[in-house]
Amino acid sequence: MEKYMKNLFPFLGIRSPERTAITSGWLKSVGVVPNELLSSFIMELWERHEREYQYVALDYLVKKKKYLLETDIDLVEYLIVTKSWWDTVDLIASHLVGVLFSKHPHLIKTYGEKWIESENIWLQRTMILFQLKYKGQTDEQLLFSIINRTSHINEFFIQKAIGWSLREYSKTNPEVVAQFIESHELSNLAKREGLKYVGKNS
């Protein structure tokens, strides 16, 4: 597991199905953590050394995401920029940030704008991916604007995210995605990923 994750994090060595089985009962017993205790509860897990503890923290937040408040955006931002890698950031982007930005759209202007302008690739990747599960509710203009503002970044995780976001949206609107890719200068990686399902869905 450590080798798969480029030796960036130590692991206890608990595989995903086993970890899910272990934590599901525990999360049920925890119930809903009062909001005033949420940050300290999540941080207690997040600051532990082994990677599985960060997964448990996210397991809880994803299960209870409907209880997230606008003010939890600061905690979520911390989780994005701390111990950052695709395995945590992608889940945070599509589940937690996606929910918070949907419920509180003004956060896109305040936090989202700051994240795009930052030099942190994980905050930028989050902005590209946060609408991943929106399907027909996707703000097409916003998605394309974010891609236009990040497409020049020569970073695998950014280019892969651009392609992924386009690929997912192509399941809803393949013609528009194909037209966007054809009319904009994108990396080969982003184009290849973005067009993967276009022929099947058009």
Image: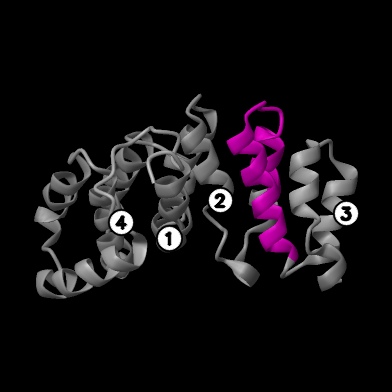
**Residue 129's disc number:** 2
Tell me where the magenta segment starts and ends, as one range.
144-170
**Sequence-wise, which precedes: disc 1 or disc 2?**
1
CA separation in Å, label 4 and label 1: 10 Å
CA separation in Å, label 1 and label 2: 10 Å
At horizontal 28% and vertical 60% (from top left) the residue drawn is 61
Q: Is residue 151 magenta?
A: yes
**Sequence-wise, which precedes: disc 2 or disc 4?**
4
CA separation in Å, label 2 and label 3: 20 Å
CA separation in Å, label 2 and label 4: 17 Å
**Sequence-wise, which precedes: disc 4 or disc 3?**
4
CA separation in Å, label 3 and label 1: 28 Å
Indicate the quadrant containing the C terminus: top left, top right, bottom left or bottom right.
bottom right
At horizontal 67% and vertical 45% (from top left) the residue drawn is 162
**Sequence-wise, which precedes: disc 3 or disc 1?**
1
Q: Position of residue 123 (x, y in %)?
A: 47, 37
Residue 122 drawn above or below residue 67:
above
Residue 3 vs residue 41: left or right? right
**Residue 179's disc number:** 3
Secondary structure beneath disc 1?
A: helix
Q: Is residue 68 visible?
A: no
Secondary structure beneath disc 2?
A: helix
Secondary structure beneath disc 3?
A: helix
**Sequence-wise, which precedes: disc 4 or disc 1?**
4
Residue 127 vs residue 49: left or right? right
Q: Which residue is mark 1?
A: 95
CA separation in Å, label 4 and label 3: 36 Å
Amino acid carrying label 2: it is Leu
Q: Which residue is mark 4?
A: 58
Q: Position of residue 63 (x, y in %)?
A: 30, 69
